[in-house]
Image (cartoon, coloured by chain):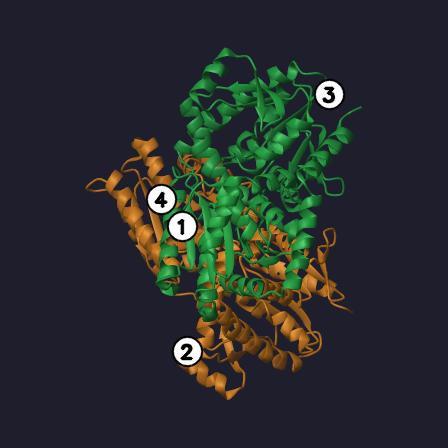
Chain colours: A green, B orange
Amino acid sequence: MTRGGGGLVTALRDLVRHAPNASWICAATTEPERVLAAAGRPVPAVIGTDAQCDLHLVAVDAAAHHDFYAVIANPLLWFVQHMLWDLATAPNITARELAAWRDGYVRVNEEFAHRLVEVGRASEPGTVVMVHDYHFYLVPALARAAGLDRFLHFFVHIPWPHPDALRVLPLEMRHAIVRGLLGADLVAFHTGRYARNFMLTCQDLLGLEIDESRNTVRYDGRDVAVRFYPISVDPESLRELAATPETEQHERALAATRREMMILRVDRTDPAKNILRGFLAFDRLLELHPELASRVTFLALLQPSRQDVPEYAEYRAAIEKIVDEVNARHGTPDWQPIDLRVEENLARAVAAYRDFDVLVVNGVADGMNLVAKEALVVNQRDGVLALSECTGAHEELGAVALTLAPFDIEQQANALWEALTMPAAERALRHAAALEIVETNNTAKWLTHQLADIRSLRPA
Amino acid sequence: MTRGGGGLVTALRDLVRHAPNASWICAATTEPERVLAAAGRPVPAVIGTDAQCDLHLVAVDAAAHHDFYAVIANPLLWFVQHMLWDLATAPNITARELAAWRDGYVRVNEEFAHRLVEVGRASEPGTVVMVHDYHFYLVPALARAAGLDRFLHFFVHIPWPHPDALRVLPLEMRHAIVRGLLGADLVAFHTGRYARNFMLTCQDLLGLEIDESRNTVRYDGRDVAVRFYPISVDPESLRELAATPETEQHERALAATRREMMILRVDRTDPAKNILRGFLAFDRLLELHPELASRVTFLALLQPSRQDVPEYAEYRAAIEKIVDEVNARHGTPDWQPIDLRVEENLARAVAAYRDFDVLVVNGVADGMNLVAKEALVVNQRDGVLALSECTGAHEELGAVALTLAPFDIEQQANALWEALTMPAAERALRHAAALEIVETNNTAKWLTHQLADIRSLRPA
């Protein structure tokens, strides 16, 4: 049971399900895909079980793809947009990064734009072109410059920071990125804060005129619309996932070993997820409340992430070190306070979603965080969501979750205590309210709102 | 020859010179000062040679002062406002920092506010109260709450970052800081960017109503004015300093050893100053242009700073390491490319100001940077200013300086080359234009504009 790409793929599958005659352009990453790509013809494909589309595979030169992906997109753009650089010492933009931009990021964007224009030109008039995420910032402007006459929609799935954060990028890169996006007719984000930061970026870094009442940026004689649509989950398919024999088997295993209370986190081992401070807060909780000894377990299900990027490998090592320290400090022969599993195991994650008492989502920056939404949908114990104010999800769920200040260990320890000792009636109320929000703001609504805006923005 | 506090003290001296019957409230930091403080009476004092005022010394408990200064103001607030934290791992706000806030920062601010209210009540009606810098954010609100009925002016001398940067601080701290400042009638910054960021902070973090056309924040039934006044230097006293025998002696010594070209930097050893990347850019310059060998020296005059803060001690060690590496890589038996002096020596700095060909100011964040202005005033060689876009000074001088992108080593190397090879006529034009800006926007103008705004904002 695996699911590449997490929540985004689920959302795109739903999108394709709603779009007859959809074409999907993506990179060929395996050898058979490269063979298909070389043939130059689209391949009929099914996403999930029922979403049909034509797949257009783009074969990218391996060296160019490495520079595009492992030098520019991750970590440079990811770190800039999540504000993760230790700016006194990193990044150093050198000739290496400039070459990776030119020969990697720009080149791959050109190849995708080229294919997009081919496919787009063959499409029916009125077809909507959607480009997703920070790997393809240059595609809208390139496609427009090539004369593609279709509605261009771009969705940024990671945070858009304040303008000054973009100054970490060389002038050439930051201008190309913003101008690339402004090639679109509609630029979409997950939250109002990101959308506003993008408008301020256009104003501060490029001197463009913005209209804060209409949420548009004036560029090149056009008004580019800037909007936000919080991405969500599909409750029905999550419940199906939670009812599979594999999930149930993991749930029985968890039930057999669980203590009275279970704190859970499910994350990639990414510095943005703030895993270290989560464990430090738990450490402090056990220090403040020794009566919790042997009664609570912090289950951390972490998927290894980008281990070819040195910062990620170091971060994973730091996680393992801190877990050893906390377990040594508070553990007993038959109780390990933190149960760390570094693995890809969706079934175990969904089983844990069902049974947590407190879910910790304490990221220092997180475009949305779909774990929070997924876990709420299937949880069976009126579990409490402890949610960082620096996640996109906090715009929707902040009022019913316990808010975490991600840099404040003491505040997080106190919030964990509040969550663990919350009266059952309050847990039930908060959980029901959170569930209502997620059920209402589901993936279908995410899509419907975008399509409605596209209809109203598109010339008649 | 020493000058405590650098440019700020110069500006305040000029302020006191223009203000008859001025009272200055400051901390007692030496034993004799503590004795005077205990007597509870003001002491007549002269700042510089001719600025007279009454000095009110506040004796602060040593432990409280340590927490106030070495835990909260530096490094926590300094790092937050200069965006220097490696956010994946630092800072960790723990019980220690929360106690230092309460028992240090809050307590010291209360003591200063208490004294300010005493002195302010005894002052003539119409007296203006000015509070300076990030150590005293809480003072305006405390003084107002205590009923002090005088015009309250606050000047922030360091960058004010975008709202999200403030989220590193616990909710209690960030709210207290913003509300503390909003106790003033006028909150002043060095640049329009900082002033705007402050207004956005009021709006985003506290939900306050702002008026971007009038530059006011609505708070507690009042309109708080938000303005910017770029601080400057006093050209006349700098020229006096440059003409002293001590400076001339250093100038002769520099002339005897200098190569054809001299690149200069003068900074505290502060991570915000971006000293490492400056040397990396010079390293790259020598690699790209081996014809510069033996013809250019990078003179770095660095004043040791805050060596009790671990981040500063580490940064200084990293500086020394990189200098050794660059000198080993490019140096010859009779030529060391980088001449590093870690010392307090104002006379040598002023001598070097006179003789540089290129001044490097490449900070990642810098409230103003007065070195750029000081050095321009006394330079005798039509020296070129290479100035980071992330300094406050860039708002005034960006059009006539060569702009540096502080994270981009390659761009800085190329800018250094452009500066070193700039035709004499262009150097002269740029230098004259820069000098004109500094001469016009001098300390007197900085003061006059503030006093004019205070007159127009004060009720008749």
In space, the residues marked 4 and 2 are separated at their CA atoms by: 38 Å
Point out which mark residue B279 bears: 4
Q: Position of residue A385 (x, y in %)?
A: 59, 55
- Give yes or no for contact between labels 4 and 1 (Cβ–Cβ under 8 Å): no
Q: Earlier in the sequence, mark 4 or mark 2?
A: 2
Q: Position of residue B418 (x, y in %)?
A: 43, 34
- In the image shown, does B190 or A389 lie closer to the viewer? A389
Q: Nearer the viewer, mark 4 or mark 1?
A: 4
Q: Is residue B211 visible?
A: yes
- Give yes or no for contact between labels 4 and 3 (Cβ–Cβ under 8 Å): no
Point out which mark residue A228 bears: none
In space, the residues marked 2 and 1 are separated at their CA atoms by: 35 Å
Disc 2: host chain:
B
Q: Position of residue B250 (x, y in %)?
A: 32, 55
Picture quadrant of residue B282: top left
Relative side of A340 to A458, left or right: left
Asked if labels 4 and 3 share a chain, the reply is no
| Callout 4 secondary element | helix
Residue placed under numbered mark 3 in the picture: A126
